């Protein structure tokens, strides 16, 4: 019974299969296939293709590689396609410029162009390639979608030559300009014409002041080995160190390479050494005197109970003694029991008494205050100094740019910092900013500005601040009516300036030190009677001395048995008297009881009290007229 059923099933399946094979095809609703499209629908879009381009790179600048884009047929509407470059063996930015843009085919056109900038160089290298790719067409399909750009090297093969910048040297001269010649050489004869670029680079020499900058391109003819760069050097009359600048070469052509890229031009100074100004190189303290001598050494003489002579002892010296270890001093400042020197490197060293922190060492302990320094010690953290001034127990320094720093005793507000406390380290005092000269007395300090105005701070009991009052000031106040001052000096209790060659003074006058012919204390300035050609002024305790433009000197005030006026007598004078046997003076410095002057040739002559050896003539004997200090030439 089972077999007939199987046979029946097979027959049924066969019949169904046969029916499927012979049934007529039925149409299926939906979009027509391409084979069934209308003629308009069968129209195909044009294809867009890009060709290749090649260009010789050149030695400099930019050349254009032109890539042609082509449509397989024209189009009735606009066709666009995006174009972008890509690196192959060439590098964007070095060998060619990047391009990313859209190229348009107006309706009816069949070609367009994409331009790529190719960069020139002088490097001998293989031909390099980059690609320009098409993407995202509209109104067309993509055909050839990438073009190859060839950067064809046209540099000559490397010659193996090296080009080197030489050196040059020239004396600057005193006026005008003169050319220095700098050779640039090849390591062998040039096989063809070659070039190399060059330019000047400043060193210690300044463009526009010491030389005129130049740049250019030097050419080597075939067979040549040397070319020359010319640089104008500007003459002047300033004595200065030799200065240098650099000539730098680059980008040689013809396959040469740079060997020595930098040459040095040396501008040699041919101006004479100017005479050393003695200003600031002689200083009289209370009972001692110091001077900077040739070679930067410092010599001091006089009282030494506090180590203010800096020679490692406490012994008074009646003749000059050398300060230990100083070889580069340029200025010196003597106070009561301390002395400071400004060095050529713009730092400061001080020695002697430190009871009021006048050495500026930055430490404030009783032990440190009690410890004298018998030889110079560096003032920590102080650089850029251009002038130094020592008061009785405090010190001030002017720095490059006009900053003023003070330290030491602050009693009475003498530092001008708004207080009256002692200061252990050099501290900027805003009220002195811009001062070009500082002068420090016993309990007061004054500054002079470039416009000739003067300000003072500190004790004012005797009117020494010159502001018309007796009020002490802890910050600088202007001296009344003073402008155009060209020199400034402070004493124990009085102050003087020089205005239009006339000394003007104020303060204590019981001994006639103001020189106005009276003994009346003045709270603002009065002119010194009979002096009209003053160039410098210096003040002691009760006397005042001035240097005249003629090189002579005059003094006024208390004379006494010390003969502080140096006029050959012991008579006091309320008007100035000439100093005897003195000529050629340029700088004058007064201690409490003595005065010294630098004269022609750098010799130092002193007069007044000599009880502590402050005249430096090898004795302790006083003198009525100036004597020459033994063995000292200010230099």
Image: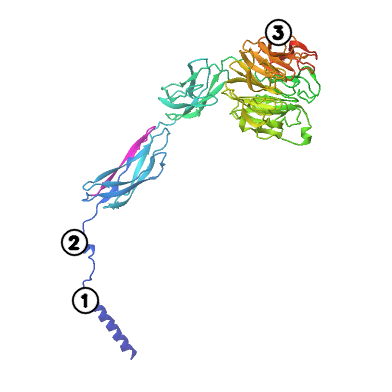
Q: Which residues are magenta?
A: 54-72
- Residue that lies at the very extreme toward the left in this rendered image: 39
Pick the residue in front: 273 or 536: 536
Mark 3, other Cα within 10 Å: few <14 / some 14–19 / many ≥20: some
The residue identified by callout 3 is 581
Is residue 632 found inside the magenta-colored segment of the image?
no
Up the image or down, 48 lies above or below 468; here it is below
The residue identified by callout 2 is 38
Q: Secondary structure at mark 3?
A: loop
> Which of the 4 quarters of the picture holds residue 336?
top right
* Viewer can see residue 408: no
Q: Position of residue 131 (x, y in %)?
A: 36, 45
The residue identified by callout 1 is 22
Prevailing secondary structure class for the magenta stretch in the rendered image: strand
Q: Earlier in the sequence, mark 2 or mark 3?
A: 2
- Quadrant of the snapshot with the C terminus: top right
- Quadrant of the snapshot with the N terminus: bottom left
Is residue 62 found inside the magenta-colored segment of the image?
yes
Q: Position of residue 257 (x, y in %)?
A: 47, 30
Q: Position of residue 478 (x, y in %)?
A: 61, 27
């Amino acid at each position: 019974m089972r077999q007939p059923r199987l046979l029946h099933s097979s027959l049924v399946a066969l019949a169904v299969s046969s029916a499927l094979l012979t049934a007529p095809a039925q149409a299926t609703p939906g979009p027509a296939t391409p084979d069934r499209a209308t003629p308009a629908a069968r129209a195909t879009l044009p294809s867009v293709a890009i060709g290749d381009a090649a260009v010789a790179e050149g030695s400099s600048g930019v050349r254009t590689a032109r890539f042609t884009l082509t449509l397989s047929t024209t189009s009735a509407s606009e066709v666009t396609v995006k174009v972008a470059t890509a690196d192959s063996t060439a590098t964007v930015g070095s060998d060619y410029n990047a391009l990313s843009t859209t190229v348009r085919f107006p309706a009816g056109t069949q070609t367009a162009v994409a331009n790529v900038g190719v960069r020139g160089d002088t490097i001998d290298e293989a031909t390099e390639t980059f690609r320009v790719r098409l993407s995202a067409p509209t109104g067309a399909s993509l055909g050839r979608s990438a073009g190859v750009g060839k950067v064809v090297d046209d540099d000559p093969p490397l010659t193996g030559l090296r080009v080197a910048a030489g050196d040059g040297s020239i004396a600057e001269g005193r006026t005008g300009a003169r050319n220095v010649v700098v050779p640039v050489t090849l390591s062998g004869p040039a096989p063809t014409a070659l070039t190399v670029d060059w330019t000047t680079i400043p060193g210690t020499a300044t463009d526009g002041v010491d030389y005129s900058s130049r740049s250019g391109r030097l050419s080597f003819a075939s067979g040549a080995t040397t070319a020359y760069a010319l640089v104008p050097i500007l003459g002047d009359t300033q004595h200065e160190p030799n200065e240098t600048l650099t000539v730098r070469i680059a980008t040689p052509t013809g396959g040469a390479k740079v060997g020595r890229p930098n040459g040095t031009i040396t501008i040699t100074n041919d101006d004479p050494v100017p005479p050393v100004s003695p200003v600031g190189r002689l200083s009289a303290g209370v009972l001692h005197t110091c001077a900077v001598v040739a070679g930067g050494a410092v010599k001091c003489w006089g009282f030494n109970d506090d180590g203010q002579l800096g020679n490692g002892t406490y012994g008074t010296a009646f003749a000059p003694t050398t300060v230990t270890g100083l070889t580069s001093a340029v200025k010196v400042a003597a106070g009561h029991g301390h002395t400071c020197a400004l060095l050529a490197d713009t730092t400061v060293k001080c020695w002697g008494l430190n009871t009021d922190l006048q050495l500026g060492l930055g430490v404030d302990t009783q032990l440190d205050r009690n410890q004298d320094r018998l030889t110079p010690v560096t003032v920590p953290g102080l650089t850029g100094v251009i002038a130094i001034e020592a008061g009785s127990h405090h010190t001030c320094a002017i720095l490059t740019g006009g900053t003023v720093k003070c330290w030491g005793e602050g009693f009475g507000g003498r530092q001008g910092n708004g207080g009256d406390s002692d200061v252990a380290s050099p501290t900027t005092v805003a009220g002195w900013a811009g001062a070009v000269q500082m002068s420090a007395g016993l309990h007061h300090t004054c500054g002079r500005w470039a416009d000739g105005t003067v300000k003072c701070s500190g004790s004012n009991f005797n009117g020494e601040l010159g502001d018309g009052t007796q009020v002490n000031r802890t910050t600088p106040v202007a001296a009344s009516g003073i402008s155009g001052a060209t020199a400034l000096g402070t004493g124990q209790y009085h102050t003087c300036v020089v205005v239009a060659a006339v000394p003007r003074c104020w303060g204590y006058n019981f001994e006639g030190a103001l020189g106005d012919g009276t003994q009346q204390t003045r709270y603002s300035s009065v002119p010194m009677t009979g002096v009209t050609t003053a160039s410098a002024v210096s003040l002691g305790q009760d006397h005042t001395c001035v240097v005249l433009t003629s090189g002579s000197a005059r003094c006024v005030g208390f004379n006494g048995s010390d003969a502080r006026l140096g006029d050959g007598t012991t008579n006091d004078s309320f008007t100035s008297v000439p100093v005897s046997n003195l000529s050629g003076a340029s700088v004058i410095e007064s201690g409490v009881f003595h005065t010294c002057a630098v004269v022609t040739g750098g010799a130092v002559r002193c007069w007044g009290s000599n009880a502590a050896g402050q005249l430096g003539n090898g004795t302790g004997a006083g003198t009525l007229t100036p004597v020459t200090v033994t063995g000292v030439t200010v230099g």
